[in-house]
Image (tube, rainbow, N blue to C red):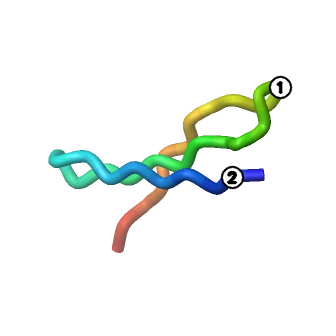
Amino acid sequence: MRTVINIYGNGETFTISAAPEEEYIEPLVCA
């Protein structure tokens, strides 16, 4: 379950999983 989205100054957007056992960062493609 991904809920938190962080946008960094370099323009990359990452989605962080809210579940502790599934904690990971998935890079998203920004068109």
Residue occupying the point 64% across, 56% down? 3
- Mark 2: which secondary structure? strand
Q: Which mark is residue 1?
A: none
Crowdedness of circle 2 by 10 Å Cα count: few (<14), some, many (20+)?
some
N-term-proximal mark, 2 vs 1: 2
- In the drawing, does residue 18 fall left or right of residue 25? right
Viewer-proximal residue, 6 or 28?
6
Q: Which residue is mark 1?
A: 21
Residue occupying the point 26% across, 46% down? 8
| Residue furthest out toward the right | 21
Query: Where residue 16 sits: x, y (%)?
Result: 58, 42
Residue occupying the point 40% across, 49% down? 6
Query: Where residue 9 sits: x, y (%)?
Result: 16, 48
- In the drawing, does residue 23 fall left or right of residue 8? right
Q: Which mark is residue 2?
A: 2
| Residue furthest out toward the bottom | 31
- Mark 1: which secondary structure? helix
Q: The disc labelled 1 sits on which kind of residue?
A: Glu
Q: The disc labelled 2 sits on which kind of residue?
A: Arg
- In the drawing, does residue 16 fall left or right of residue 31? right
Q: From what the image shows, is residue 22 above or below residue 13?
A: above
